[in-house]
Image: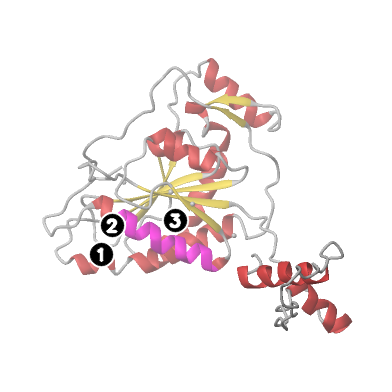
Amino acid sequence: MTLPCGISSHALGGQQQSEQQNSPQQQAQPPQQGAPPQQNPQQPDAPATPAAQSQQGGENQSAPPQAPVHVGPVVVIDPGHGGTDTGARGANGLVEKDLALQMARILRSELERLGYRVMMTRNDDSNPSYDDRAAVANAFRDAIFINLHISSSGAAGSTRTYFYEFPSSSPDSYSMMATSAATATFKTAIIPWFEAQRPFADQSRRLANLVQIELTHRFSQSPNAPTPVAVRNLRSVAGPAVAVEISSVSVSDPIALTSLTGPLAAAIAKGVAAFRPINVAPPELPPTVQPPTGQPPASQPSTSQTPTGL
């Protein structure tokens, strides 16, 4: 258009040397007949291990502080396109897949600064399938998925947030199963992979609203509300999922667009923090998603020149 201490080898070697010196099984060997008497050379003291240093320090030596236990969600960033799928191209030389990856890395730094654990669906010029991208998020019990794109047209600097909208036609058996999973129990429900987003439609809408509010504050030409669209990147994600798009690769000055990646990352991160503050556990477990079987993973289109770039 969203992947963790030890004892140094020197200290460990010193501990082994100290144990060999104090071991009762190590006996002095008598000198051989006719050989000069053996001398016991003075060996240097082995360096103290961390445990020995702690014992020598007594009660005043406190243990190192434990790292805080991560409770909050994992944020999965999905830079759109990649590989042979370049996405939108501008006459100024901007390529959507490259700028999307740059935006993703800046957003990752901003989220990590706030304390979130962050994964990326790609961190190079590769093009994972839709299902492979969704699988990164679905591998976690509690994940938020953010898909990033740059449009091929539109007012420079305007930004839009999308959440997935399923067709309004009569539901089939799979969609009915997914809907019942959302309203019944999250612990025992199993839903098809391609319906994974349905139970999270309300959460995704709320996340999109909060992100769009922040984007509108920073980018005045942006709409006030998010847009429901059937964005394929979001459909198989079993968790809150949104797509964010900024305009556009057609700007005359590439710096005018790349300079907006910092404010864009700050706005998205603030929206995520409003949706799920760090170290706050989710209210309930997500449903189990049945991986796709018998069908090859859907591949992404080779080009994207639509006005939205999705």
Residue type beneath disc 2: Leu
Q: Residue at x 58, y 55 (%)?
A: 275
Q: Secondary structure at mark 2?
A: helix
Instruction: Give left or right: position of 34 versus 175.
Output: right
Q: Residue at x 67, y 55 (%)?
A: 71
The residue identified by callout 1 is 257
The residue identified by callout 2 is 99
Whether residue 178 appears in magenta in the rendering, the answer is: no
Q: CA distance from mark 1 to mark 3?
A: 18 Å
Instruction: Give left or right: position of 288 versus 240.
Output: right
Pointer 2 local density, CA inside 10 Å: few below 14, some 14–19, many at least 20: many
- The way the protein has been coloured in the rendering is secondary structure
Mark 2 or mark 1, whichever is nearer to me: 2
Q: Compare residues 62 and 289 and report the one nearer the observer.
A: 62
Q: In the image, which residues are magenta?
A: 100-113
- Upstream in sequence: badge 1 or badge 3: 3
Magenta stretch: helix, strand or loop mostly: helix
Instruction: Give left or right: position of 82 versus 3.
Output: left
Q: Secondary structure at mark 3?
A: helix
Q: CA distance from mark 2 to mark 1?
A: 9 Å
Whether residue 104 appears in magenta in the rendering, the answer is: yes
Contact between labelled residues 3 and 1, with CB atoms less than 8 Å apart: no
- Upstream in sequence: badge 2 or badge 3: 2
Q: Position of residue 105 (x, y in %)?
A: 39, 60
The residue identified by callout 3 is 212
Q: Compare residues 304 and 212 and report the one nearer the observer.
A: 304
Residue type beneath disc 1: Leu
